[in-house]
Amino acid sequence: MNIHPSITQERVIEAVESQMFGLENPGFCLACGADHDECEPDASGYECYECGERKVEGASNVLIMVA
């Protein structure tokens, strides 16, 4: 699966940590790299409100992809 180059391992780890230790539920659009709020950790195929693609994934899913 293609992942936008702006979605780095460091960025994803930071998002997963904020999810684990806070109240945030971050996600990322794999097509355009946009951040998304209120994504379930295992979210997959959500619609991006920036580009319209159905490529938003929860941070935990993305961590598995970039690790």
Image: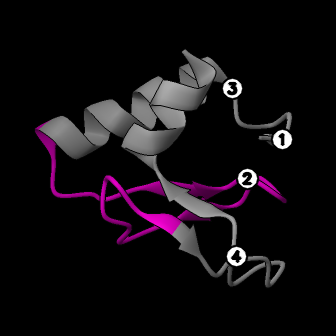
- Judged from this view, the residue extending furthest toward the front is 1
Mark number for residue 2? 1
Q: Earlier in the sequence, mark 2 or mark 4?
A: 2
Could you say where residue 44 lies in the image, as x and y percent from the top left? 50, 63
Q: Earlier in the sequence, mark 3 or mark 1?
A: 1
Instruction: For label 4, count other residues whose C-alpha is less than 10 Å away and answer few (under 14), some (14-19) or many (20+).
Output: some
Q: What's the residue type where badge 4 is placed?
A: Arg
Instruction: For label 3, count other residues whose C-alpha is less than 10 Å away and answer few (under 14), some (14-19) or many (20+).
Output: some
Q: Which residues are magenta?
A: 21-44
* Proximity of marks 3 and 4: CB atoms separated by less than 8 Å: no
- What residue sits right under mark 2 in the picture? 30
Circle 1 — which element? loop
Instruction: For label 1, count other residues whose C-alpha is less than 10 Å away and answer few (under 14), some (14-19) or many (20+).
Output: few
Is 9 located above or below residue 42 in the figure? Answer: above
Query: Which of the image's four quarters has the C terminus?
Result: top right
Between the residue at mark 2 and the residue at mark 3, the CA separation in whole angstroms equals 11 Å
* Proximity of marks 2 and 1: CB atoms separated by less than 8 Å: yes
